[in-house]
Image: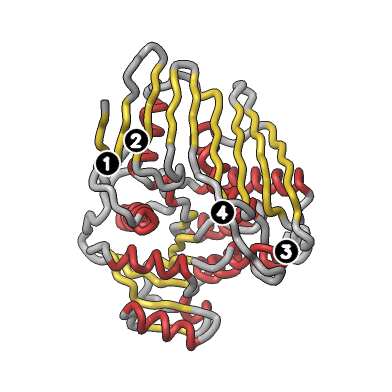
């Protein structure tokens, strides 16, 4: 048995579809010029109601090169200049997470709406400062947790809410890759918030909390690099309901990124990447035939497709006057950052220049 989910299906909450144009284009600014900024810019260029009008970097040369590559009319050699551009409706912050507080804060203080990459910040304190700033100024702010905007994930959440597997009791999710990082690379540098937990662990932790909320218990073990950041980490979360989650993240080994959600009446399995799935399978107790739910019109560009859903949600919120998304609520992002803080405390990873 199978079911197809359309790319614009609302799911449990929120509305709108990818490419659903409003009355006017939303004007985007891109802050930073790395790989994820490039992928997101490509995604925006495929949306008829989005327009990339400016890019900013800490160096004028990189900003100009990025602007020329994507036909962006304005390039700035500083973040502050980009933030000051009042012809921008929303800024996408694509720096490493160690700079999110500074970059997103600059934009909010200048009156710009912000979509900020994950992990939201270095720690819960910084995240709280950004949320407080956005709320005080009544500005839109959202963490770029693209998984939450994926229509297939939204369908999965809706099915669980409808009782498809009964009470959720166990979640497992894993994410990792083998990276040959030099000691000075940001992934190994404590001065840049290095380690697997913030860069990779944010995905399984966010997935578990999407389904179960903030955990009551947090346990973790990890192998640490000579720089004293984690490169291979296992995480156990527990809830007073009796539910548990087994999660892992690594930057030392190629892993699949599956997930399994087990409940009192069945289970849901994601065999591909759980953070950007194109299908999942429902196994119900007492039913011999599993049910596969697929994303209609599957694309091989899963990163770009997932980013398009994320961008569409931002633009829907801006047009409606909302200051946060019901799909990626700020309180949820704060809760994830609190859990990440507790995990780092468990494995004794600290950032002396940042925390």
Q: Residue at x 40, y 72 (%)?
A: 29
Distance of mark 3 from mark 1, alpha carbons?
41 Å
Disc on the earlier residue, 3 or 2: 2
Q: Is residue 185 above or below residue 144?
A: below
Q: Is residue 327 above or below residue 45?
A: above
| Residue depth check, mark 4 versus mark 2: number of the one nearer the observer | 4
Q: Is residue 256 left or right of residue 156?
A: right
Residue 190 - label? 3
- Dot 2: element: helix
Q: Which residue is mark 1?
A: 9
Residue 5 location, x and y as percent? Answer: 27, 38
Q: Residues within 10 Å of mark 2 (few under 14, many from 20)?
A: some
Disc on the earlier residue, 3 or 1: 1
Disc on the earlier residue, 2 or 1: 1
Disc on the earlier residue, 4 or 2: 2
Question: Pointer 2 and pointer 1: residues touching (CB < 8 Å)?
Answer: yes
Residue 339 location, x and y as percent? Answer: 65, 43
Question: Pointer 3 and pointer 2: residues touching (CB < 8 Å)?
Answer: no
Q: Residue at x 26, y 32 (%)?
A: 3
Distance of mark 1 from mark 4, alpha carbons?
31 Å
């Amino acid at each position: 048995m199978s079911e197809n989910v359309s790319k614009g299906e609302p799911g449990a909450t929120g509305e709108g579809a990818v490419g659903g144009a409003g009355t006017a284009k939303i004007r985007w600014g891109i802050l930073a010029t790395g790989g994820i900024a490039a992928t997101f810019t490509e995604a925006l260029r495929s949306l008829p109601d989005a327009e990339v009008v400016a890019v900013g970097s800490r160096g004028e040369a990189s900003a100009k090169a990025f602007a020329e590559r994507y036909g962006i009319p304005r390039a700035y050699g500083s973040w502050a200049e980009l933030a000051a551009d009042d012809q921008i409706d929303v800024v996408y912050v694509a720096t490493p997470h160690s700079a999110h507080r500074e970059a997103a804060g600059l934009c909010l203080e200048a009156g710009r709406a912000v979509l900020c990459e994950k992990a939201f910040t270095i720690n819960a304190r910084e995240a709280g400062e950004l949320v407080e700033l956005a709320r005080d100024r009544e500005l839109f702010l959202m963490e770029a947790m693209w998984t939450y905007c994926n229509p297939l994930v939204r369908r999965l959440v809706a099915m669980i809410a409808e009782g498809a597997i009964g009470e959720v009791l166990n979640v497992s999710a894993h994410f990792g890759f083998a990276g040959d990082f030099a000691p000075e690379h940001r992934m190994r540098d404590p001065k840049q918030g290095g380690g697997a937990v913030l860069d990779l662990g944010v995905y399984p932790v966010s997935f578990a909390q999407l389904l179960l909320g903030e955990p009551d218990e947090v346990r973790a073990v990890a192998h640490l690099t000579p720089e004293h950041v984690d490169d291979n980490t296992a995480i156990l979360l527990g809830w007073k309901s009796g539910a548990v989650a087994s999660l892992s993240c690594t930057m030392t080994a190629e892993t699949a990124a599956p997930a399994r959600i087990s409940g009192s009446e069945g289970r849901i399995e994601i065999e591909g990447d759980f953070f950007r799935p194109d299908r999942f399978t429902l196994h119900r107790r007492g039913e011999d035939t599993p049910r596969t739910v697929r994303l209609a019109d599957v694309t091989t560009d899963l990163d770009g497709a997932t980013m398009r859903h994320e961008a569409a949600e931002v633009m829907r919120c801006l047009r409606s006057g909302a200051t946060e998304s019901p799909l990626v609520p700020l309180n949820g992002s704060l809760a994830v950052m609190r859990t990440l803080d507790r995990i780092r405390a468990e494995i004794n990873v600290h950032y002396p220049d940042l925390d």
